[in-house]
Image (spheres, grey):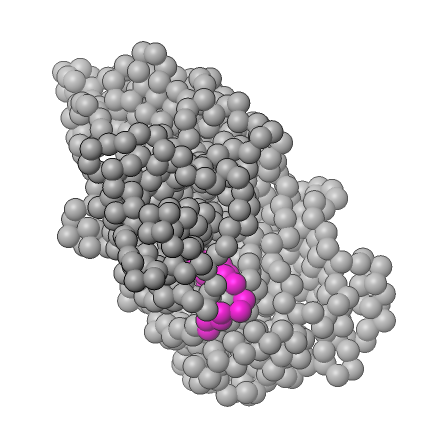
Amino acid sequence: MTDICKLSRRAFVAAGGSLLVFPQLLAGQDNAVEATPLASWLEIRSDNSILLRSGRTETGTGMSAFYAQTLAEELSVRPEQITLLMGDTDRTPDGGYSAGFLTGAANVRKVGAYTFQALLRLAASELGVAVSVLRVEDGIVSGEGKRISYGQLIEGRQLDLKIPVRGNPTKIDRASNWGVGGLNGYVVVGDPPLKPISQYKVIGTSYPMPGIPDKVTGRTHWSGDLPIPGLQSTPLHARMIRPASIGSTLVSLGTLDKKRFPTAELLHQANLVAIVSPDEWEAITAAQAIASTTKWTDWTGLPESENLTQSLRQHNWGVPNGTRGNAAAVQRALSESTRVLAASFEQPYVRHAPIGPYVAVADVRPDGSITVWTHSSHSQGLRAQLAHMQQVPLEKVVVRWLDHAGHYGRTTHAGDGAEADAVLLSQMTGKPVRVQWTLEEDLAWSSVSPGWIADMQASLGPKGDLTALRTSFYSPHMFDARMLGAILAGRPTSTSKTENWLAVEWPYEKIQTRLEQVFGMPNVGAATATGGLRGNIMRTPGHRQQNFVLESLMNEAAALAQVDPIAFRRQHTTEPRLLELLEATAQKAGWVARPSPRQEAKTCSAAVLSGRGVSIIVRDNAYWVGIAELNLTLATGLVQVTRFTIGVDCGKVINPRQLDRCMKGGVVMGLSEALKEEVTFDQQRVTSTDWSRYKILTMAETPEIRVVQISRNDKGFGAGGEAANAVASPAVAAAFFDATGVFPRRLPLHPKNVLALLASCR
């Protein structure tokens, strides 16, 4: 325990009382940019209620449930005693971005543990007994026949507790990969005694997710709702008027007909154009009228989505920016092998298919202070981005977070969304402004997860095992966090690197001879600073793309060796957790061992073919297995996944029900990407701008999803919030091969691609 962690008393009060837990930067930390006082992390009140303040936000992963359970466990209280305040930059400590549950939960655990020890010391003093004899249950401290609640301990007192932290506030950082530094915010240091997992009572139970009742009953205040809490006046409504592409520039503005739109105002700054009005419908119709007569330069820098692969192949990739393995050993093994498997894979651009398009409200005051209401998953990063765009000190910007729909992982690096638009328009009008993107606008202008190509070579030994493997992954930019509004307005915005990284952890330790390389390039079509498609990460960044390639190759190699695909994986690993999960998931799926494809695959004359396939992934102390079963209608090329079995071992399961939701949600997302999703574009613009052209899996197409969870008390915590989608694509591809005898090496498997694939191979 550090010397910092001592209770201090601020004052006596007649009634009430509280214990506030603050982060305390250790000596030597560069906190010069943090001019505002650090918000308290935790507040325990005399009525036994507890407020946990988290800089991270709930974006659909169940974090609000997990955090409450984690803190409740360390404090030995009920989760119902805890409320969460999330994502407000002026009222929560900088907790970094809302990704990587484990790093955020580690902070919560340590804050709880430090506080628990302080409460024990306080209780020992009050009760006149030794700390060692005290026990705590549901916030009641007892020992030697005496008892007192946390609330009674605090009543009439104002106490502070400082928790030691390291780190710097999130800020613009040109040296970082994504242009924003401090992604993890403040990190709690020291080694407070944590409750042993074997003594857990709350973690491991299906505690209901806070906030669901309010969402179901309509009490939740969404970011798109009005009025905005804390905003003194109704904001102006704004609709943006966009060029065809980010590379186009404004030639002439259309004329606003004031007789038809008497309260509307046309605004522009460089290539940022918008209509604002007190009446939302007037803003919509006026923007449509102005858009039809506004002129832009033509820009034709994109390669067309049909030519994406060819365009990527023509790029001079230079040296890899990530390498693992031994090139000479792999080359020697490949040259000496009599059986070498070579394959190339292609994946298109995909994007978050937003059920709820971006929306934000901004209030810029004459003194330069800025308040923004948003659903960003990186409030502190957004604060840094906006301060940088406006060239004002960080403390001039406040970001307040609100719930939003269809949001998962969309703003990890803080740069996307409507916030920059709203700030710039509020500054121009001197009034609060609400910017609502349309679905078409969101599908055309939000950042995209880049397409990939990959080449692989593998050698098989005399026993059919893989003896060497060489992989090369190529991808356009995937860290572009520049704010669209800042780009169009010609204002400062973050700059990130174009490199890439090797994401997938290696699950097959028996394949010791391998070389993995990853190459990165700028945005496609980025001949100018403002051109091209802005690439950014999505759920399971990098892992989804790389795992499709690695696991597809494992399935092809198993077929070449004429070995059952699950048995083939067992051949190449000794990891007991993975072996047990493979067995449990296969049993749940009713898997019967045999080589793939099935014997009838290439000769079957049936109208509908069936197949099954498997894939795995290892990520952040978590093992995942996916088994897909599908039907293929030969006449139409329609692939329908009929059942998907997903298994995970992520160490100690915190909340089985929420994990079940995450797993099923990830499977649906992964199946949608495997079967349907593709961002299309011509030389000028994105063309997949509605649901008929950017297709996603529908409710009717969702298969039965079976779930297997293995919880362990001796392996710590693993990442259970993502990765389910990363096993979907390779499992579906393997099932397609099992049904047809044809390996699909390009996604998605929509009917047009399937018919072309079958025609070329039969």
Looking at the image, which residue is at 30% across and 49% down?
150
**What residue is shown at x 54% (from left), y 87% (from top)?**
593
Specify whether residue 160 is in view.
yes
Q: Image quadrant for the C terminus?
A: bottom right
736 or 8, which is in the foreground?
8
Residue 609, x across and y down, in percent: 44, 80
Report if residue 202 lies within the magenta region: no
User: As drawn, which residue projects farthest toward the front?
Assistant: 128
Q: How many marks?
A: 0
Residue 20, image x, y percentages: 35, 38
- The residue depicted at 43 percent of the width and 34 percent of the height is 380
Q: Identify the residue at the far top of this view.
A: 366
Q: Would residue 752 be visible to someone looking at this image?
A: no
Please tell me whether residue 129 is drawn above or below residue 288 in the rendered image: below
Q: Nearer the viewer, residue 517 or 98?
A: 98
Left or right, residue 11 beside residue 178: left
Residue 445: x and y, percent? 41, 37
Specify whether residue 716 is painted magenta: yes
The residue shown at (56%, 74%) is 577
In the visual, does 304 lie left or right of 655? Answer: right
Q: Nearer the viewer, residue 448 or 423?
A: 423
Q: Main secondary structure of the magenta part?
A: loop
Question: Image check: 285 left or right of 76?
Answer: left
Q: Quadrant of residue 685 in the image?
A: top left
Residue stretch in magenta = 710-724
- Percent of width and height locating residue 573: 65, 74
Looking at the image, is 115 positioned above or below residue 29? below
